[in-house]
Image: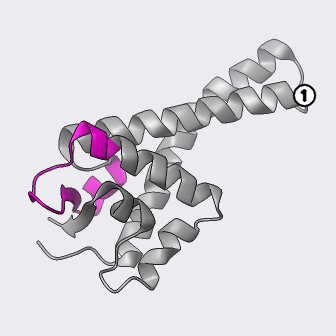
Amino acid sequence: GDRAGAGRRMIADLLDLLVVVLISAPIAAGIEFAVGVRSDPRVIGLTGGIAVTLMFSYLTISVALTGRTLGMRLLSLRTIDVRTGLIPTGGQAMKRAVGYIFSLAILGLGVIYALIDREGRTMHDRFSKTVVIQS
């Protein structure tokens, strides 16, 4: 298939972030309700850690099993191994998830990199030796 455009990929990324927020928000609210304090750095750290863990799990499992996340599925995108053309291995999916989370942590620069990359790949694509195509 053809390589996916940066615009479609960013929309898929936003949809995936929405999925993670919808999953983690009730958990965070439950923790804050149980503790009774929102501004405690420990509560903020715990809820942030849970959100990052959920994001890592969501991205790793969905890409390793199907080659796509829910956001990618809605926009007809698929992640493949650059060398084999098959869906990524579990290791590649883990690298991709870590790279994506890191890309977001540095203000999205790893995702925005796709706009200047001659192949349209993000930093987490390069790190995991994968590419996103239209399927």
**Residue 28 falls left or right of residue 124:** right
Q: What is the image's colouring?
A: one colour
Residue 33 as seen in the image, left or right of residue 52:
right
Which residue: 21% across, 58% down?
78
Q: Which residue occupies 18% across, 63% down? A: 82
- Amino acid of disc 1: Asp
Residue 14 placement (x, y as % from top left): 49, 59
| Residue 7, x across and y down, in percent | 40, 77
- Residue for point 38% across, 46% down: 95
Q: Residue furthest top?
A: 34
Quadrant of the frame with the C terminus: bottom left
Around disc 1, counting alpha carbons within 10 Å, would you say few (fewer than 14), some (14 to 19), or many (20 or more)? few
In the image, 68 versus 74, the foreground residue is 68
List x then y, in percent, for residue 129. 27, 59
Residue that numbered label 1 is attached to? 40
Q: Is residue 16 left or right of residue 130?
A: right
Relative to residue 42, is residue 125 depicted above or below? Answer: below
- What is the quadrant of residue 114 in the picture? bottom left
- Frontmost residue, 4 versus 28: 4
> Is 10 one of the magenta-colored residues?
no
**Percent x, y of residue 17:** 51, 50
Residue numbers of the magenta segment:
70-93
Q: Say which quarter of the image contains residue 105.
A: bottom right
Element on which disc 1 rests: loop
* Residue 73 magenta-highlighted: yes
In what quadrant of the picture does the N terminus appear? bottom left
Q: Residue at x 61, y 29 (%)?
A: 50
Figure disc tally = 1
* Left or right: 52 in relation to 118: right
